[in-house]
Every structure is written in C-alpha cells, then in structure tokens.
Image (cartoon, coloured by chain):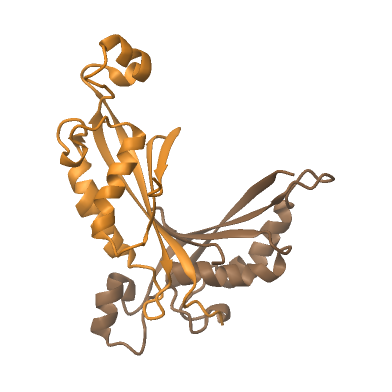
Amino acid sequence: MSETRGRIAYITHRAVFSAAHRLYRDDLSPEANQSIFGKCATPFGHGHNYDLEVTLKGPVSPESGMVMGLAELEAIVDREVISKFDHRNLNRDVEAMAGINPTAEHLVRVIWKQLEPALPAGLLHNVSCRETPNNRSHFKGEH
Amino acid sequence: MAKVYLTRRAGFCSAHRLYRPEWSDQKNWDVYGKCSSEHGHGHNYVIEVTICGEIDPETDMVMNLTDLKAIMERAILDPFDHHNLSMDVPQLKGVNTTAENLAVVCWDLLLPHLPDGTLYEVKILETENNAAYYRGE
C-alpha cells in the first residue's frame, strides 16, 4: 500500500463563464486602439465562453486524503468569480475589473486577486483562462 | 539536447466511495458530501501520464508510446477498470480514493516500470471539471 500523506499534489477545478468585453484604452486614439487590439476593439464589444481552470498545490491531508475538498473549491470559485463574471460585460459590470482593460492577461491576474484571499494561505498555484479554443493565459502569482 | 514531454491518456470506469471508517457518518458527510454515499458512485476516469526526457538520436522518440501504453495498462487499467476502487483493487487497499491519493498511488505503481528519471506527472481527471495531479514532490 502506498503512503500518500505528506505528498504534494495539485488539484484543478474547471468552470466556465460567458461574458462580453472590449479591448480599448481611452488614453489612445481610435486608430491606435485599432492597430493594437484589432477586431477586439470593435465599439460595442464582443464575447467569449471563457474556460477557467484554478489549480491549488499543497500537501495531501493525512486526515481527509485531499489537498482541499473539490466541492469547497468549486463553491469558492463560484462565489468569487463565476457569480460576478458570468453573463456580464467585463468592461462595465464587473467591479473587480473596473478601470482595467480586460485582456486575457489582466483577466487571470484579477481572478487570482479575487480567489487568493478566499483560499487557505499559500495553496493557490495557477489561474488559467481560455478565451477561445486557441488562446489561453496563465498567472501563477509571479511579480 | 532538447528535453521533451510526452503524454499518454487512457480511461478507466470505476466505482468508489470517499469514507473514513474511523469517522462518524456525519463527519464523513461534512467532509466528503455526496461522495460518501453509502453504496458508492462511479466515474469515467481519465489518467494522463507525462514522461520527460531527451529525444533518443536513434529512435527519434523520448519513449515508445506503445511501451508506455502497455505499462499503463498493466499497472493501472487492468486492476482499476470496471472495478470498485474502494473495495476490490488490491493496489488501493487501505487508501481513501480521493483524486489526490489516486494520483500518488498511480505514480507509485508506474515508477518502477519506467526508465529512471522519466516520470514527470500523473494526472487523474474524475470529471471534466475536476482533476488532481502529482509530480513526485
């Protein structure tokens, strides 16, 4: 029989949310926005089915055999992210994104900031978000 | 020499139950929720095994994926598939079959059959939305 206690494992919970956004900087001209953000700068925005993966890294509890209950992780992701981001406009309706250009890169950084205080200290390892099947960004809390 | 990662995926269909006999039913329910239901439940598990190494200049492979497939079948799929992980898999005797523990045990089962230093990660997906992985740490 394998001894599993004390081993460091990773758990990932996946969740999806559907949101509108527009990539645009008010401090740049429409031409500059068009040249940097292309069709993502279209005036009235567009949308994605975002696919979020939240990964925790930590010791397997000798009591529960888990890093953290996946149901508990799901509830936290749901409360801190999905309930606030799903079926919203990231530029206009989401408090955590206020004043932030909602690129895929900023999005994972903001989601990390939302989740970290709600999780046991030191467990959050990676936040990854897929905008389309072809594009994904990751943040590991590195500065 | 370039270091390359190679992943082989496989599936197994198994029942399990998360339950610690030394705890009360209420405590098991508090910790494991519906996963502690008395008669178990099941998943279409997916296991992804990643090995890592240099490309062999003779074969142009890190490892023959057919060999990796055969090792996974022998070590994991044969004993796990269409069994109850909490009841009738000798390799899991005494193990509470959380995704984390499964990833660790599968690592331990595969390690002796693979060339030294090649095993990089064992990932267990219980559902499309939940996965655990272990890297030997």
Q: Position of residue B92 (x, y in %)?
A: 53, 78
Q: Which chain is brown?
A: B
Q: Position of residue B61 (x, y in %)?
A: 75, 46
Which residue in the rendered view is the most extreme toward the right?
A: B58
Q: Position of residue A82 (x, y in %)?
A: 23, 47
Identify the residue shown where x is 58% and y is 68%.
Answer: B107
Which residue is nearer to you in this view: B16 or A50?
A50
Image quarter where the N terminus of chain B lies is: top right
Q: Quadrant of residue B76?
A: bottom right
Q: Position of residue A20 (x, y in %)?
A: 24, 30
Which residue in the rendered view is the most extreme toward the front?
A: A143
In this rendering, position of residue A29 left or right of residue B123: left
Which residue in the rendered view is the most extreme toward the bottom?
A: B22
In this rendering, position of residue B45 left or right of residue A51: right
Position of B62 relative to A23 (above/below)? below
Position of A15 relative to A100 (above/below)? below
Q: Colour of chain A?
A: orange
Identify the residue shown where x is 47% and y is 72%.
Answer: B101
Identify the residue shown where x is 24% and y is 49%.
Answer: A114
Which residue is nearer to you in this view: B128 or B5?
B5
